[in-house]
Amino acid sequence: MGGAYWLASRAQQHAKPAATFIRTAKAQSGRLEQTLRVTGMTAAENSALILAPRLSGSRHSHGRSDFDLVIQSIVDSGTAVKKGDVLAEFDRQYMLLRLDDYKDAVIQHENNIKVLYANLEVRRRAQEQKIRAAKGALDKALLNLKTAPVRSAIQTERFRLAAEEARSRYEEYVTQSKYLDLSDLAAIRYYELDYEVSKLEYKRAQANVEKMVVRAPIDGMVVIPSTPHGSEMRQIQQGDQVRSGETFMQVVDMRSMVVTASVNQADIDLLRLGQKARIRVDAFPDLELPGRVIAIGAYARSAGWRRSYVTSIPVRLKFEKSDPRLLPNFSVSADIVLNAKEGATFVPKECLFTENGGRKVVYIQKGAGWEKREVETGLDNNLVAEVVNGVREGEVLAAEPPPPGALAAGVD
């Protein structure tokens, strides 16, 4: 009989449940933030694209490369510049020769026009002299014709013919004078038009010479992007030729940096202008800078060529504090603070359990067991949730449901 009792007691001992390990967490108090994570790229809020100058003027350069844009000098990328500093200078030798040519052409046309006007005046004076002489001859012939009553018929006929000849000559000179003026003025106008063209080309050449020295429009740092040159990617350098209007440089104001990001269309209603953010730079894991939302896009956009039902809204954040290491085109992540509460008691969200009816409960450690409590939650984020009542700071909570045998007696 004693042997049977021993066997029964051993069976009961083996039937006891083994100790179960349960993950736990402590309730904490402090500042609780509800955030939205976005990713984007850094950019300068104030920047200027530097384009190769667009040169103007006629292209009949007789084989010369007047309009070629070959870089003669250029500042290094990363150089800090002030407004008005020289960024790059293109080879201006041919353009300076063009400027001299048109300057000489303007002077030559001015002198030619002066000569033509002087010749016109001389011709007019000579024509006027001829007209006066013809008028005198006509007057004399008419006076001679008045003596016809005392002249013979033959002499009278001679005077009449002489008068007609003098009249015809006089009228011819008068009529000829008008057409000679038109001819001379037309020739002068031809030279005047050439003169205007030369002046226009001279002014264009002057403007081109100035354009070929590129100056900084703002204070900032020079950024030269890499572009394809043959089989390699490299920055534009001295001796390279660029196309008119091509972007070959950028000046960025490092004093004011922003983040260009995008937010899923489902989360856009959570954002407001002025919301604070914590921005982290991927290139420097230890760098975290404060920022705020300064712009929210007005319409959604989708990526890719095909129609997409997952669209995003562009958002811009501004750094409220700068760092010397911060440069444009760095990838960043930002936590935008949607709501915040000071002195909140919060627990990890894995410590909250939902029962039938939707009520929230937690399991609080009580000695060797667990006490189940119904709680009311408030503000939350992806990791923790505020507990409005039912939990105190420092209490230990179960991160997974305890076994039914571990619950304190009398607790449902």
Image (cartoon, helix red, strand yellow):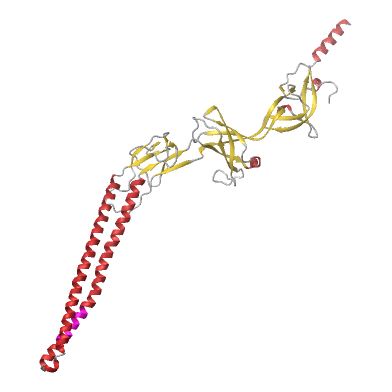
Does residue 253 show up magenta in the picture?
A: no
Q: Quadrant of residue 350?
A: top right
**Figure check: 106 above or below 125:** above
Residue appearing at x 71%, y 30% in the figure = 385
Q: What percent of the width, then of the height, locates residue 341?
A: 69, 32
Judging depth in this view, the residue of 61 and 143 nearest the camera is 143
Taking the image as drawn, is residue 58 in sight? no
Q: What percent of the width, then of the height, locates residue 210?
A: 35, 46
Taking the image as drawn, is residue 408 in sight? yes
Residue 9 as seen in the image, left or right of residue 392 = right
Name of the residue lying farthest toward the right: 1
**Figure check: 283 above or below 158:** above
Looking at the rendered image, the quarter that the N terminus falls into is top right
How many numbered circles does the render carry? 0
The prevailing secondary structure element of the residues shown in magenta is: helix
**Figure check: 156 above or below 241:** below
Residue 340 as seen in the image, left or right of residue 12 = left
Q: What percent of the width, then of the height, locates residue 142?
A: 17, 86
Residue 35 as seen in the image, left or right of residue 324 = right
Does residue 171 show up magenta in the picture?
A: yes
Q: Quadrant of residue 78?
A: top left
Residue appearing at x 22%, y 62% in the figure = 115
Residue 171 as seen in the image, left or right of residue 324 = left
Which stretch appears magenta?
161-172
Judging depth in this view, the residue of 77 and 234 nearest the camera is 77
Looking at the rendered image, the quarter that the C terminus falls into is top right
Residue appearing at x 39%, y 34% in the figure = 76
